[in-house]
Amino acid sequence: MISEEQILERLFVHLRPLVPPRTPLHADIDLKQELGLDSIKVMDLLMALEDEFDVSIPLNVLIDVHTPAELARAVHALMEHTDGLVR
Amino acid sequence: MALFDRFASLAQARAELVQGHLNPFGTRIDEIFSPTEGRIGDYRVILAGTNNYLGLTFDPACIQAAQQALAQQGTGTTGSRMANGSYGSHLSLEAELGDFLGRRSVIVFSTGYLVNLGVIGALAGPEDIVLLDADCHASIYDACKLGGAQVIRFRHNDAADLERRMQRLGERARHALILVEGIYSMLGDQAPLGEIVEVKRRLGGYLLVDEAHSVGVLGGRGRGLAEELGVEADVDVVMGTFSKSLGAIGGFAASHDPDLELLRCASRPYIFTASPSPSAIASVRAALQALRSRPELRERLWANARRLYRGLAALGYRTGPQPSPVIPVLLGSPKEGVAFWQGLIERGVYVNLVPPLATPGGQALVRCSVSAAHTPEQIERIIEAFALLRAPAGQAMAGA
C-alpha cells in the first residue's frame, strides 16, 4: 500500500507545472490562497493523481482540503477504503 | 468579518480589470430593437452574445401567444406545481415536447439550471457515482453537490479517458451516471456522443445529455446531438432549456422511461419553486411549433455560423475546434480581453466576455453566438469589427 508521504511526493510533481517557475512549495502551503490555484486547477491536480495511482478519486475528497498535506491525506484515506466512497 | 467581506477580493479583481464606462461583468443593455440589435449606452450594437439561436424572441406568433396567455391567465402562477397545481398549458407543453422528442415522459422546470439540479440532484445521491465531462456547465457541478454524489471528472471530449475511469470503478461503473453536453457552451464543440455510447454499451451506466445549446441547432428535426448522431435510444435522459433556441425561460427533462415521472415527487428543485409563467409557456409552445415547421431557421443559423467561424479564422483568430453557433475567440490576458470586448462594442458589436479559462496560460475569451435572425450583412459587420481590432494589438492576441 502506498504511503501518504509517497502520495505527497508525487503530488508535488503534478503541482509544479500549475504554478509559476521557482515557486517554493511545501506540504502546508494553501493551494488556493497562497498558490492562487483556481478550483479547476485543483480538480485537474486530482485527475492527475487518479492517473498516477490508477484509482478513482471522487472530487468529494476536496471538501475541506486546503493544502498538499491535506490532499495527500484525503487521497490516502480514500485508497484505504475498499468501496471507494468518500465519507 | 462583515457579512460580504468574503467577496471583497473577487470584487477588487474585477474592478481592476474594468477600465472605462463599459463593464463586461454587468452589462446594461438599454434597448432591444430586434433579436439582433440593441443599444448599450451610446452604442447601437449588433447582438452577437445572446444564445438566441433561432432568433425567435421577436417572432410574431410567439409574441401573440404570450400576449394572449398574459391577458387570459395573468402574469404568473404564483406557486409551485406540486402545492398549487399545474396549469393546463404546462401539461400541454410537456405533451408537445414528448411528441417532438419522441420520448414518453417529459417534465417542464422553471429554468434550465433547475432542470439539471432537479434531475441530477435527485438521481445521484451520496452512494452514487457521476462521471462528468470536465467542461460540463456549472449547473451540473452544482447538481452533484445538491445530491451529494461521488463525482469523477473525465477529460473533455475524451471517450477513452471516460472508459479508463469507468474501468477503474469496476462493477460500480454499471450504475454510474455519465454526463455530457450536446454543444459545450464555452468552446462550442460537440461531445463525441457516438464513442461515449460505445463505452456505455461496453461498461454500462446511464447516459444523461444536456442539449441546452443543441436543441433547435442539431439533428434532422432539431432534437439535438443525439438525433444528429443517431443514438437517441442510448440516451437515458435528455435535458434542455427554453432560454436559447426557444427564446423564453424554463427547461425540460425527457426520457423514454415513463418512470421519469417519479421525479415529480422526489425532485426538490421541481417541488419547491414557482412554475413557469403562462406567457413564458405560451411563447415556448409557439416557438416549438416554429422550430418544427421552419427547418430553414436551422439552415440560416448554420450558414451564419459557418460564415462567421471562417471569417474570424481567416483573420487569424484562434476560435473553437469546430464551426458552431457558439464561437469563442481566444484572447490574451484578462485585461486584453476586457479591452477587446470594449473595442467591439465601440465598433457596434456585442459579444460575451468570459473571464480567463483555467488553463496554464490563463486566457480570456470572447464568445460570439450566432442567430438565424442575423442577416448576412450583420455577419459581415461583425467580421469587420474583429478585423479592425486585429491590428496592431490584436496581432499579439491572435497569436497568443
Image (cartoon, grey):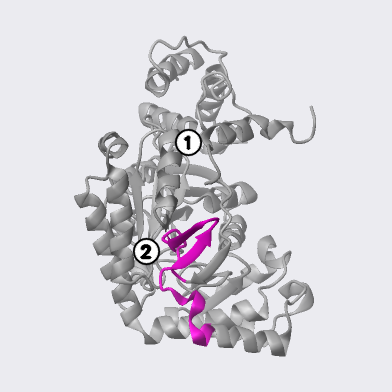
Chain designation of label 1 = A
Left or right of B207 on screen, residue B376: left
Residue corresponding to mark 2: B370
Where in the figure is residue B353, as x and y percent of width and height?
A: 46, 47
Residue A4 x, y percent position in the rendering: 50, 16
In the image, residue B316 lies at what x, y percent? 22, 45
- CA distance for labels 1 and 2: 28 Å
Quadrant of the rendering where the C terminus of chain B is positioned: top left
Q: Quadrant of residue B273?
A: bottom right
Q: Position of residue B279 (x, y in %)?
A: 64, 80
* Amino acid on which disc 2 is placed: Val
Magenta run includes residue A78: no
Q: Residue at (37%, 64%) from the top-left corner?
A: B370
Mark 1 highlights which residue? A40
Kind of residue sitting beneath label 1: Ile
Say if B315 sits above or below B206 in the image: above
Q: Residues within 10 Å of mark 1 (few under 14, many from 20)?
A: some
Asked if residue B376 can be seen in this view, the reply is yes
Q: Nearer the viewer, mark 1 or mark 2?
A: 2
- Subunit of mark 2? B
Left or right relative to B399: residue A29: right
Looking at the picture, tell me which residue is in the foreground, B19 or B48. Answer: B19
| Element carrying mark 2 | loop
Task: State the extent of the magenta-drawn residues as a range.
Answer: B35-62
